[in-house]
Structure formats: structure tokens, C-alpha cells
Amino acid sequence: MSNLPVRVRFAPSPTGPLHIGGVRTALYNYLFAKKQKGTMILRIEDTDQNRFVPGAEEYIKEALEWIGITLDESPWNGGPYAPYRQSERKSMYMQYAMQLVEAGFAYYAFDTSEELEEMRKRLEAAKVPDPKYNSITRMQMKNALTMPEDEVKEWLNSEKPYVIRLKVPRKEEIRINDLIRGWVMVHSSSLDDKVLMKSDGMPTYHLANVVDDYLMKISHVIRGEEWLPSAPIHVLLYKYLGWENVMPQFAHLPLLLKPDGNGKLSKRDGDLGGYPVFPIEWNDPTTGAKFMGFRESGFLPEATMNFLALLGWNPGNNDELFDNAQLIELFTIERIGKSGSKFDIQKARWFNQEYIKKKSNAELAAYIQPEFKEYPIETLEVICGLIKERVTFLSEIKKEAAYFFNTPTTYDQAVAENKWNSEAAAFIKLWADFVFKIEDFKAEVIKHEMHSLLESNGIKPGKVMQALRLALTGVGQGPDLMTVMQIIGKSETIKRLNHALQTLKVIG
RNA sequence: GGUCCUAUCGUCUAGGGGUUAGGACAUCUCCCUUUCACGGAGGAAACAGGGGUUCAAUUCCCCUUAGGACUACCA
């Protein structure tokens, strides 16, 4: 069993945008597959026709591509076990359900939803602690176990709807060996007779999942912790279908939790906190609602991957910065934590900052080039080198770069009020005339000249530098001013100084 | 309510029968500096509670508490 080739799958359901927690599940599957030289499969679990959301499947594809999770087999690349959409595999499930019925492990049930509801109410009224369709209550319901054989046959031959339910044993200890949690024991009496085949002819998750994992020769099922309670059902199915010896190993991942307060991370949290909880932007086709994505918020895919990988897993030392190849090299299921992780966007921001700093000036220049086409790439590179240490997001680079090319049209109100006084204005006027005379317009020269001018006028640098910055860039902070002047050039410097002198009112 | 899972600084976590309980993010102080950052130095900050087991428990066991998941003809 353990010598089987490693084949893992990520099996999302296209009912909306892929949550960032889902991306992490995909990532762990991917890292494990790559580490074990195995196969990473993506299967679309679209057995619920009512929950189909247009664009959701495309979204999954795009999100995984963006973050850098590559798929060996998928609906889009195909593979030896195609098709990879459960809706396209519809015809494959009934035979296995029939196999279970014939072996006495499943049975037909004919109850209407009203009758089911009635049963629930009755059990609740009787104060049954755990009302469900199970080994006891099934005998009071309308199914093949309680109805005469010919009546059952008649029903099946008619057009009337029916389902197939799993016949959960009454008293049996079911054990699951989870790779993360160890042995988990559940008694069959706490399980209910899950529907396997729905009345629309589609299988439920439980059947489809087990059948497909078997057919696709999945060796390890790595999925969210929300599946742990139904894992005993799946174990039962493997056993009843006679596949116990090829049952995959399970690893149930801890959940991603809200950053503040309690509960698991949800769609809402992003809106409330002003940060993304989705990999890429999602525009809901039905409600028109828009959800921001990591990508659109300026996160780099490699930073997002690194952040996600460390949320619930670590290599066992104090290192935190890993690229894709290193993550693959280091990844093991044993080092995945057992407890849920609160989602901390601050940490994500830090990762992003680190990755931006790691980028070469050339890469960054290429990124902003479309917006500054008319400028030489060398200049853009210098500018990127100057500002990359001070930003968290790519978008900020564009913003910061802008003032190198555009004379400010507005000036930061607060800075103007605090720093633009008569002394500063007087010096800037003086400096504007002085700049004319500087032959070699280089940062070091400019600095030297400015300091001698300041000194000869008995002015402390701190008194005027902020005002000068405001005049040149329109804002109160930024990289070294002397370098800024060098880059924008002598005539532009003078132009900006004069523009500021004309525009800004002297206060005090 | 029932079943199951979980529990180390505010957060992500390392560790593990005997440690000054380590790191990172965030936070605070100082240094650098023309500003904001970056960088450097330092500070504050944790083993949920109660029982066992043991010479010794934060670590192992049990209980409590807290949090989480599940409890559909959804996945």
C-alpha cells in the first residue's frame, strides 16, 4: 500500500471563488506530490447541478496558475483517467451504488422531503438526542427495508423518484488512521444512512469522491478538516466496495481561522478588514458583488505561496523565506500542525515586502515600464532600486515612481502647513538660483553644494529639507532628495522649485 | 444538543520529562538619517485550569474549560 506511486488530488467544487484556504489545501497537495515525485491531479466536483456558478471553474484554473501550482492531470490538460469533471463521469457511479445494493450494504429509499422533515420533528419532540436517518429510524421510513418486495419493484419501474442510502451498521467501531491526527475512532451509531445516489441520478460527494479516488488510483487524500466527520463514511464505502486494501491514506488539514474573534475565515472577513481572502479578484455573476484578490492587491504569487505554506506548516527551524523549489524540498505531512491558524494579513504583507526587495531592479523596471514607456529602462531601473526597499506592494512602486516624471500639481496639505514657512521659502528661492551654477549635476556634488549654501546662510538642514522635498515631489517622504534631483535633472529641478514658490502660500 | 478535532507570547510557530521556553510578524525604546522606509541594537510579551504518573511536568495520562468542524437528496 505504501509502495504505490503517490497520486494526490485537489477536488474543488465550482460553486464560487476558490477561498484562500482552498488554495492552501491545493498547495499542500502540490508540495507533497512534487516532493514525492508523484502526480498532482485536479478534479472538479460538480455533482450538484443547482449550485453551478458560471466562471467558477475558470477562476480555479486562473488562481492556481497565478500562484504557481501546476497540475499534472486536470480537466484542462486531460490525463490518463479523464474525464476530470464529475458531471462528465455521471454514468460511472450507478454501477457501484448497485454493487452496494446487491451486497446488502445500501438500499433504496423513497421518502419525500416532507416525510424526512416530519421524522426529524417527531424525533426532536421525543427528545431523541441525535435525530437522524439511521439503523433504528430507517425501519419506520419508506424504503426497501420496510416495504414489500413487489412494491419496491413497482416503485423502481415507475417514474417516481428514489435515492440509494448507505446501510450503516448499528454497532461498529470505525477507525481512521489520519496522517496528521493519528487514529480517530468513531462509533457507527453516531453516523447516519447517508444518501449515495440522489434522486436526480447524480451521486453525492461521498460516493463520487470514493469512486473517483479509487478509479484515479489516489494514494493520499489531503483535504480540509471539515471532512473529518464524514471520513468514517468513506472508510465504510471502501470496505463495502471491496477496496480496503487500496484505500488512500488520509490527512485532514487544520482550518484557516478569522484573524480576530472566532470562527473560520469567511468571505465577509475580507470586506470587513479591507484585505483579500481570495487569490484573485472575483466578480459574482449573480449578485454583482466584488471580492478583492491577493493578486489585485499587489501581492506577488511567490510571496503568497510562501505565506500560505507557512500557515500551518513549518520546516522545524527558524527559517521562513522559501521559494517554490525549497518548499518542495522541505515539505512533509508530519510537520503540518494540528490546530487551526488565524489568518494574519500583516505577516502576508511582510512576506510581500521581502519578495519585492529580492526582485532585481530590472524585473521591477519591466513591471512599471508600461506606464512610463517614454523613459529609458536604465532610468526606471535606478528609480526602482531607490524605492523598492520602502514599499510593500508592487502598485506602490508605480505610485512612487510617478513623481520622478511628473511635476507635482498638488502638494501634501499637512506637510505644507507644517514645513512651508518663510525661512524655507527664502532658502528654496536661493537654492533655485544656485542650482543654475552647478556644472556636474550629480547627487554627491549637489549635496556638497547645498550644504555649503546652508552653512553660509546659517541654516540647519532640518529646517528646510522637508519643504524642499515638498516642492520637488509634492509629498512628505521618499528617497534621498539629492538623488531625486539628479534623476529629474537640473532644469526640471529649477522648474519645480519655481512652480512650488508660485503655488504654495507662505504660512507664518 | 450529539459526534469528532484542537490548546506555547496579541498572531504564526520551534521545543520537549530537568531549557535563562527559541524565532518571525505586530508593538515599544534607542541608533542611523534631510523625511518615510530599510538596516542595526535592545525591551515588553506565552506553556488555559485542576488532578494524577514521576525525584522532576509546560512536555505523558485523565477531567474541566475554551475554541473549532460536522450534524442536507451541498460539497
Image: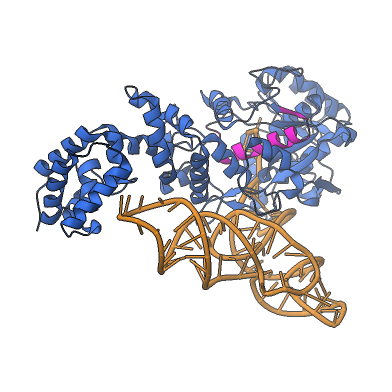
Q: Which chain is blue?
A: A
Give the quarter of the image for residue A88.
top right
Q: Is residue A251 left or right of residue A67?
A: right
Give the quarter of the image for residue A231.
top right
- Looking at the rendered image, the quarter that the N terminus of chain A falls into is top right
**Can the viewer see residue A142?**
no
Q: Residue A483: percent from the left, percent from the top? A: 32, 41
Q: Residue A249: percent from the left, percent from the top? A: 81, 39
In magenta, the rendered stretch is A17-40
Q: Is residue B15 left or right of residue B48?
A: right
Give the quarter of the image for residue A296.
top left
Display colour for chain B: orange
Nearest the viewer among A62 and B52 is A62
Nearest the viewer among A162 and A173 is A173
* In the image, residue B55 above or below residue A400: below
Q: Main secondary structure of the magenta part?
A: helix
